[in-house]
Image (tube, rainbow, N blue to C red):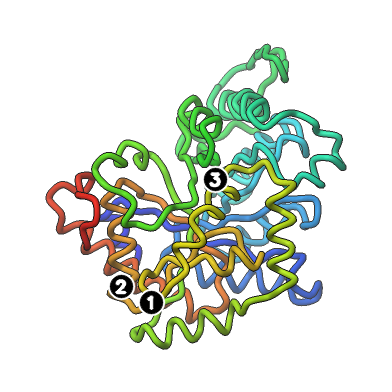
């Protein structure tokens, strides 16, 4: 997968298991296994979640670094948890110890109960204004050879210097949620990759290409050579769950996340076998991204349309096993080849197929 994706200018990230869903005595082994699978399949990096219920993502990232050679942890960073200097220090320390690059997934919000417990009452859009300051400080500390002074609405530092210094090739890549206007503006201000939850690929066309450039998507994939086999596995892995549906409805009532509302709006018309785009796992509160389900040709067609629309980075859901990632690797190879055959990869008419 590495060479093909590199030629197509695609970057694929996997996602690390969550400590809350795995037995304590198995969790470290699961993290190591998923990290190795991801690296073997050619993934650029691996997303490590953060929230009040999970173990610290920086400690998990160290385990990943110790058990892989090239895989880059994509660490979720919540400003409410630590000062921006502490984030910059972790990045520079990992570089000093392992000579490895870290990516940062800058999180403006989170579960409302988590924010309430932390007494973070900052409104949604204001959290993105804070995130811009927060991330700007991190970038300046890591990119400067001298002391940094910054005075903003939320943070102030004076003559603060980062030691050990970070080598320029190891400067972190930065991702920001781009599902809301405030998130998109923050990503643009920071020169970051905007991460989105995609609509069905048929909804993208020439008029959407600017919207997709410099952006990535969160998506799960279940694929096999046979569509029937892929859908059988999908339904076995994500059966309907009344408790999960109730949890989803409750989350909708208390969440101010734009992506949650956007996905819910497209769910009713998207859940059929006529399209590989599937939101049943999301509606049953099993995961927080859409899935693409089907045979290799169908799923790779869908991925190729996303690439043609302008998306060049993909964050996959947590894999169920190594075999799942191997099948996913195959459809990315196909999608990359299909995208490369297009003379104008960012200019595709609405409704076209790969």
> Which of the image's four quarters has the N terminus?
bottom left
**Mark 2, residue position:** 298
* Distance in Å between CA atoms under marks 1 and 3: 31 Å
109 sits left or right of 275 in the view? right
Give the vertical position of 267 relative to 124 (above or below).
below
**Mark 1, residue position:** 294
**Residue 345 in view:** yes
Q: Nearer the viewer, residue 252 or 326?
A: 252
| Disc 1, SS | strand
* Disc ID at residue 195: none
Earlier along the polypeptide chain: callout 1 or callout 3? 3
| In contact (CB < 8 Å): disc 2 and disc 1 | yes
Which image quadrant is residue 53 in? bottom right
| In contact (CB < 8 Å): disc 1 and disc 3 | no
Give the vertical position of 289 relative to 136 (above or below).
below
Q: Nearer the viewer, residue 343 or 96?
A: 343
Earlier along the polypeptide chain: callout 2 or callout 3? 3
Residue 45: give x, y in percent of width and height: 50, 56
Q: Residue at x 75, y 71 (%)?
A: 243
Q: Residue at x 70, y 64 (%)?
A: 18
* Distance in Å between CA atoms under marks 2 and 1: 6 Å
């Amino acid at each position: 997968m590495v060479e093909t994706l590199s030629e197509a200018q695609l970057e694929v990230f996997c996602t690390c298991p969550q400590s809350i869903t795995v037995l304590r005595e198995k969790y470290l082994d699961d993290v190591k296994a998923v990290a190795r699978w991801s690296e073997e399949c050619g993934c650029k990096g691996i997303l490590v979640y953060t929230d009040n219920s999970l173990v610290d993502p920086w400690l998990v990232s160290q385990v990943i670094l110790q058990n892989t050679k090239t895989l880059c942890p994509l660490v979720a960073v919540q400003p409410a948890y630590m000062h921006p200097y502490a984030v910059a220090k972790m990045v520079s320390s990992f570089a000093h110890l392992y000579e490895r690059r870290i990516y940062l997934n800058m999180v403006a919000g989170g579960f409302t109960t988590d924010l309430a417990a932390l007494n973070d009452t900052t409104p949604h859009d204001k959290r993105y204004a804070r995130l811009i300051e927060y991330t700007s400080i991190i970038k300046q500390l890591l990119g400067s050879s001298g002391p940094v002074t910054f005075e903003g609405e939320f943070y102030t530092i004076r003559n603060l210097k980062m030691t050990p210094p970070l080598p320029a090739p190891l400067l972190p890549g930065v991702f920001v949620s781009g599902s809301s206007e405030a998130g998109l503006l923050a990503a643009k201000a920071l020169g970051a990759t905007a991460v989105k939850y995609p609509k069905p690929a048929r909804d993208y066309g020439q008029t959407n290409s600017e919207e997709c450039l410099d952006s990535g998507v969160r998506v799960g994939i279940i694929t096999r050579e046979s569509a029937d086999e892929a859908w059988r596995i999908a339904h076995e892995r994500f059966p309907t769950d009344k408790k999960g549906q109730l949890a989803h409805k409750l989350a909708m009532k208390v969440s101010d996340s734009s992506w949650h509302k956007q996905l819910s709006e497209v769910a009713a018309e998207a859940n059929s076998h006529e399209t590989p785009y599937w939101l049943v796992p999301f509606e049953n509160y099993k995961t927080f991204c859409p899935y693409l389900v089907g045979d290799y040709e169908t799923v790779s067609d869908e991925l190729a349309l996303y690439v043609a629309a302008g998306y060049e980075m993909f964050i996959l859901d947590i894999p169920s096993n190594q075999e799942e990632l191997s099948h996913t690797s195959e459809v990315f190879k196909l999608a990359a080849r299909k995208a490369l055959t297009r003379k104008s990869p960012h200019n595709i008419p609405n409704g076209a197929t790969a």
